[in-house]
Image (cartoon, rainbow, N blue to C red):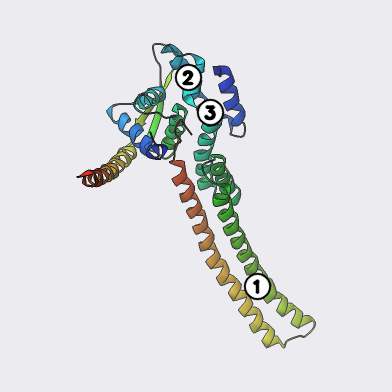
Amino acid sequence: MNIQFKKGVLEICVLVLATSGDRYGYELAVKISEKFEVAVGSVYPLLNRLTQEGYFSTYLKESPEGPPRKYYQLTPEGWRHMRALLAQWTDFTRAVNEIIEEGLKP
Amino acid sequence: MMTKYQYMSELTHLLKNVPEPIRKEWLYDYDMHFQLAAQNGQSEAEAALELGDPRTVAAELLLSYRVGQAETRNDFGGLSRAVFATVGMGLFNVIFVIGPYLGLAAVLLALWVSAGALAIAGIATVIESVWIGTFSYMQALSLGLICCSLSILSVLGLRVLTKLFFTATLKYLKFNTRIVRGKSQ
């Protein structure tokens, strides 16, 4: 996929994935890389930034296998941010799709 | 081909300037990634490849850290480090980020120096007139007052301008932080 498309989209994906329950970093990284090609290593800096900006809070939780995992939980501010981004994204894609459909009409 | 050990030591080396608690927290994520990837049957080399170049990872980690620091510290050293971290990402042509930044910083510095010079000129006029008698007392006093008030006005204006420069630079850098690079880059 075009690199330009991935800019910013990753942020929406991470935030939306965290709405259905707290996630740990690896889970998010794998979920996203299954769908489209990203450098998985970029997901962690993004998570750090979103935490730093107050959109995520983190906690460590023991896991049955291996060391404790760091979970990311959406804060109320994170929810607001996610909804705002999603609204922008929906408007944007709708507009692009309309242009494409009209453009491809015979 | 990289082993976990090679990947982690390169990342550690690249982040050596970051305070230890923060670096440890960052590295924990990558250490975990290797462990969980191994549990899922991935080899170390595969996991390393998937994570991407440690230099890119380090640059991305550093960028948001530097920007965050510049925001809290509010000094030129912090701001400059944030600007250089952005350039370190290799996302931008050096000329497009460093050039305008240095240019604007130099203009600001020049203006501050001018404001200082005006104040010195004002005081010097009064002192010189008292000492050597270039101007009469009244002339010297009014000239001195004019210079000093101009200086004070400039300082007030410059404080706003400098603050603007800080916020604008940080906003621009933060905007760039949102850019996450793809695998093929």
Query: Which residue is nearer to you in this view: B41 or A49?
Result: B41
* Residues marked 3 and 2 touching at CB (< 8 Å): no
Q: Nearer the viewer, mark 2 or mark 1?
A: 2
Q: Residue at x 58, y 71 (%)?
A: B152
> Label 1 crowding class (10 Å Cα cut-off): few <14, some 14-19, many 20+?
many
Q: Quadrant of residue A98?
A: top left
Does residue B167 sit above or below A25 in this rendering? Answer: below
Q: Earlier in the sequence, mark 3 or mark 2?
A: 2
From the viewer's perspective, is A71 left or right of A19? right
- In percent of width and height, residue A54 lies at 40, 38
Query: Which residue is nearer to you in this view: B32 or A37?
Result: A37
Query: Which residue is nearer to you in this view: B42 or B33?
Result: B42
Do discs 3 and 1 belong to a common subunit?
yes
Q: Residue at x 67, y 76 (%)?
A: B122
Q: Quadrant of residue A23?
A: top left
Q: Of the numbered discs in the image, which one, if any, rests on residue B118?
A: 1
Three-letter code, disc 1: Leu
* Residues marked 2 and 1 touching at CB (< 8 Å): no
- In percent of width and height, residue B36 lies at 43, 16
From the viewer's perspective, is A73 left or right of B106? left
Does residue B10 sit above or below B151 in this rendering? Answer: above
Q: Quadrant of residue A76?
A: top left
Q: How many marks?
A: 3
Residue tagged 2? B47
Does residue A57 sit above or below B155 in this rendering? Answer: above
Residue tagged 3? B53
